[in-house]
Amino acid sequence: MKLKDTTYKAYSGIAKYCRTGDSKHIKDLELRQDRMPHYRRLVFNITKNTLKQAYPITFKLFNNAQWEEVVDDYFKNHNAQEYRIWLMPKEFYEYVVEKKYAKKYNMPFLNDLLLFEWIEIEVHTMEDEIFPKIKKEGDIWNDILILMPEYRLLQLEYPVHIKQTKEITAADKGNYFLFSYRTLENKSVKFMDLSILFAFCIEQIEEGNTLKDIVKQFFTLTNSEFNNEIKEKTESFIKGLIQKEVVLGFK
Amino acid sequence: MKNSKKILLAGTVLAGFTATSTNALFASTDLGEASDVRTNLLSDFNSPALNNDGILASLEAKCGESKCGEKKTDAKAKNKAAEHKCGEGKCGEGKCGEKKTDAKAKDKAAEHKCGEGKCGEKKTESKKDSKDKAAESKCGEGTCGSK
């Protein structure tokens, strides 16, 4: 429903005032001007607390001045679009990436860290997905495997999910694959650190390829040789996923 | 850095991939619950050599509790994590493990204006408001008992 112009103007004015503290945005509005600073303080506190809770590792990594600077900058200058408070930290992550704070603070892993912290919220709170119909029995190598739909697969440059930030160095830069899923059992979020082969398997299973084709494709792309050890370990990985209910069954 | 179900590995990473060690190909570590991972990463005495169990064991050794304490520590760590972030802390909805739907979040968001989401705030504000109103009003217009 479209808002009335006057309502929209009032909302925008209050929002701008809350973000900047500049009373020119509200001076023409019929409201108690003396109460507005308190309203602004409350809104700002909620923003700060939400971000602090969403990014506890980043919060710990930054010194006070850095945290204040980033949050103030975001609050003041980012034109927030999301009306759902739980999604607000995602816009914060995008803002920090856009404003290149990783470079400014000489923290090359910062963007990865924020994404890693955000993904926990996203997976936990994301909308329930529709689970496909599956067969419980099938051939791991030749039948199409069906993944549970409530997951995210991330490719990271720094091992922010397995190392404390103070231990991460430039030498750690590489390719890391983080699998994050919501368990069927109690809807908690779990993480797995995957090798490139297994991340590739997940991605290709999602595409509807059989494990046999996936592995074949992997070794063609990498010019490596397929052997029994690889077969056994890949099979064992998939069986593990079946046990964890990440692979639900067969098409 | 990509965030999706499809991260185009084949086109990007695999092109430059050389298998220096076959073991690296099979590395897959179950990191466990997100809250435990976070607790470990935030912990000062953590090191990569310690996994979740290792940390819990070291806590165990520190507090001197034996077998029965183990479970306690585990529960403690979990509770602590839950306090920090585990869904509830982050979005302010429901208990950890409770099923949350976007629709639910939508409803909540719809109910509250920006910044009014916190329980109690609106109440306080309106309380304050009514106090002020009572103070402003002429005698007899306030609520019963108000000055």
Image (spheres, coloured by chain):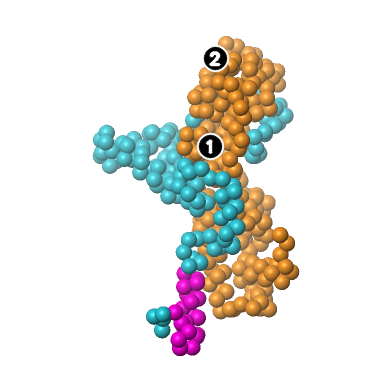
State the image coordinates of residue B14 (x, y, percent, origin top left). 68, 26
* Chain A shade: orange
Q: Which residues are magenta?
A: B124-143
**Circle 2 crowding by C-alpha within 10 Å: few under 14, some 14–19, many from 20:** few
**Circle 1 crowding by C-alpha within 10 Å: few under 14, some 14–19, many from 20:** many
Query: Does the magenta run of residues contain A198?
Result: no
Question: Which residue matches tag 1?
Answer: A182
Distance between the Cα atoms at labels 1 and 2? 27 Å
Q: How many numbered discs?
A: 2
- Residue B2 sits in quarter: top right
* Residue B135 against residue A49 in the figure, above or below: below
Which residue type does callout 1 highlight? Arg
Q: Residue at x 38, y 33 (%)?
A: B53
- Residue B18 sits in quarter: top right
At mark 1, the secondary structure is strand
Question: Which residue matches tag 2?
Answer: A232
Q: Which chain is cyan?
A: B
Chain ID at mark 2: A
Chain ID at mark 1: A
Which residue type does callout 2 highlight? Glu
Is label 1 on the same chain as label 2? Answer: yes
State the image coordinates of residue B127 (x, y, percent, origin top left). 47, 73
* Residue A199 against residue B127 in the figure, above or below: above
Quadrant holding the N terminus of chain B: top right
Q: Is residue B78 left or right of residue B8?
A: left
Q: Residue at x 51, y 34 (%)?
A: A184
Quadrant holding the C terminus of chain B: bottom left
